[in-house]
Amino acid sequence: MIRFLSLRGLPLMINVYPYFEYAADPVNARLDYALFTATSPVIQDGSLSHYNQFDATVDAFVWTMEGEGMPGVDIVVAESGWPSAGNGVYTTPNLAATYNRNFVRHILSHAGTPKRPGDYIEGFVFTPQA
């Protein structure tokens, strides 16, 4: 599939939901890492510092594409968001607003990810119901 996209100059469209990782293991998954609010790196991958789950997830796709010999495929985040209800304390309007606001801020900053700094990532907000 990646080769098909690369040969045609098409992006890989992915869904990134840090909420699901956090809700599945709130004891070991950090909320600040999921919400883009960590103030220090949570994951250090060689020289790359990941402050949020979103970047780590996108970079995992980048590493995979490079491993397949297709490093130039652009990534579009077709869906990302945080539900505002449906799973108790993990899905509140405040958490949803925090994630969605920080996601949009991150996308609009054109900061890219640690693996692809400065690369613009196109992304779309979707607020799922848990």
Image: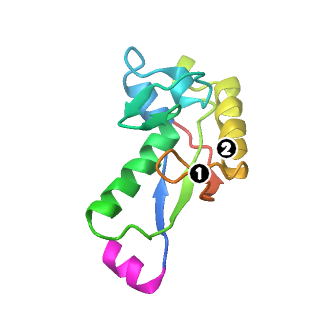
- In this rendered view, identify the residue nearer to me: 37 or 130: 37
Query: Which image quarter is the N terminus in?
Result: bottom left
The three-letter amino acid code for the residue at tag 1 is: Gly
* Residue at horizontal 48 percent and vertical 64 percent from the top: 13
Please say whether residue 67 is one of the residues in the magenta stretch. Answer: no
Query: Residue 23 at what x, y percent from top left?
Result: 44, 26
Q: Which residues are magenta?
A: 2-9
Res 17 visible: no
Q: Quadrant of residue 27?
A: top left
Residue at far left of view = 68
* Residue at horizontal 40 percent and vertical 78 percent from the top: 6
Query: Residue 43 at what x, y percent from top left?
Result: 41, 29
| Pointer 2 residue | 106
Query: Residue 123 at what x, y percent from top left?
Result: 62, 56
In this rendering, would 59 be left or right of 109?
left
Q: How many marks?
A: 2
Residue at far top of view = 27
Query: Callout 1 environment at 10 Å: few (<14), some (14 to 19), or many (20+)?
Result: some
